[in-house]
Amino acid sequence: MASMASLACVAIEIDLRSREPSYLQLAAILRARIESGEIAHGEALPPITFLVQETGLAVGTVRRAIKVLADQGLVVTVPGRGSYAR
């Protein structure tokens, strides 16, 4: 199970010049970490504030990326608690 400290050590790089929208890039990065087990089943995703600071993306963009994962059934979001890998 990855801790927040270990997630912080792995850079999240978004290519702002890419044709792929930033939120889809972030969703793909988080999906890969969930599928690899780096973010284990039931474990919280990094908080939105952390992802905003780490990526430089807007809060709405980060939320949109998490919604993509929720729509795919990879995460569940609990209001006021965060998002968790399924």
Image (tube, rainbow, N blue to C red):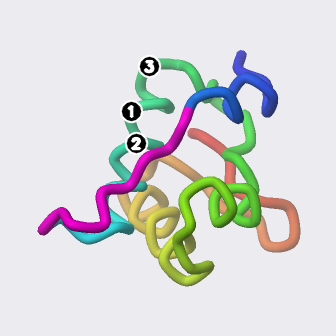
Q: Which residue is mark 3?
A: 36
Dividing the image into 4 quarters, which one contains the C terminus?
A: top right
Bounds of the magenta segment: 11-19
Question: Viewed as shown, does residue 24 lie left or right of 84?
Answer: left
Would you call the spot at circle 2 few (<14 residues within 10 Å), some (14-19), or many (20 or more)? some
SS class, disc 2: helix
Q: Amino acid at mark 1?
A: Ala
Residue furthest bottom as drawn: 60
Q: Are marks 2 and 1 in contact (CB under 8 Å)?
A: yes
Q: Position of residue 71 (x, y in %)?
A: 40, 64
* Residue drawn at (41%, 55%) of the image: 26
Establish if 39 lies above or below 52.
Answer: above
Establish if 45 lies above or below 57.
Answer: above
- Chief secondary structure of the magenta span? loop
Q: Which residue is mark 1?
A: 32
Gap in angstroms between the C-alphas marked 2 and 3: 11 Å
Q: Which residue is mark 2?
A: 29
Q: Are marks 1 and 3 in contact (CB under 8 Å)?
A: yes
Q: Amino acid at mark 2?
A: Ile
Q: Please tell me which residue lies in front, 15 or 46.
A: 15
